[in-house]
Image: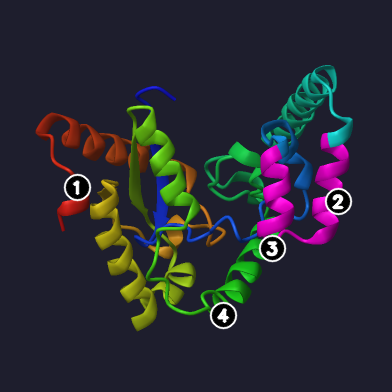
Amino acid sequence: MEGATVFIEAAAGLPDFSTFNDSWVHPDEPWLIVPVIDWQNLVRMWMASDTPRGNKVDVSMRYSLQAVSYIDWKRRRLLQVGDQVVSRLGARITTGGENGAADLSSAGGILSDRASVERARRLAVELAQTTFKDSPRADWSATVLMDVNALARRHGGRVVVFRMPLSSVQQTPYTTTARLADVEAFRRQAIVADIDYLPIEFATTDEDFPDYWHLRNSRADEFSRRVAVEYRATERTGLRLANVD
């Protein structure tokens, strides 16, 4: 962690607002936290978080049974399974739309076959209708983001939040008055917390998001280069971009 720069994406300029009072695990894979949690934080998860009880029990049982050899085996097993999945997916995925496949990367197990893309699109539309039903998010002090920033600062590092482009389907929930106020609230608190913000402008259309979730593969490198260029510009000039509109 010494001197590390931590990049965190912010959809439409609004990062994730999760706090440690929210669930700590993904409900489908709660065991992923086991190798990186200690006893004190296991207790904290039980006492202070909204993690579903069944997930808490699962994590606790796996934690109590773990040993270094078991964890190492589990990691190796996961890597093997991941390689197999990526290998199988790679045979089905193209970057030019051949054989019905969308222009999507296979990284992270993203599916690009026609049926999977259609399912992803339907899910994106459904979730867009229920996204941000909560109250405005003005106080960022207790968020995981701010905790990560404090950790990086203690080790002489920095946190850089960059604006991530979205399809129009996912962009819509961010255009309400409440969400725009949330974006401004984050920008103000980012300045106080000394978090750098890269307000990257990257022109896209919905054709650039084949499944409405992911930027198409043929433009991914272009976006990565834009992030790198703007980040390096902050290093050369010494500007703290959280203070720049």
Local secondary structure at mark 2: helix
Which residue position holds label 4?
Answer: 129
Q: Read off the residue under disc 3.
A: 50
N-term-proximal mark, 4 vs 2: 2
Q: Identify the secondary structure beneath mark 1.
A: helix
The residue that mark 1 highlights is: 241
**Quadrant placement of the C terminus:** bottom left
The amino acid marked with disc number 4 is: Gln
How dense is the environment of label 3, judged by Cα within 10 Å: few (below 14), some, or many (20 and up)?
some
Q: Mark 3 or mark 2: name the one nearer the start of the chain.
A: 3
**Camera-side mark, 1 or 2:** 2
The residue where tag 2 is placed is: 57
Residue at horizontal 43 percent and vertical 37 percent from the top: 151
Q: In x, y percent, where is residue 5?
A: 36, 32
Specify the amino acid type for callout 1: Leu
Foreground label between 1 and 4: 1
Provide the residue span drawn in magenta.
Answer: 40-63
Q: Nearer the viewer, residue 8 or 21?
A: 21
> Residue shown at 10%/34% (left/top)?
237
Residue 6 visible at all: yes
Disc 1 to disc 4, how far (Cα)?
Answer: 32 Å
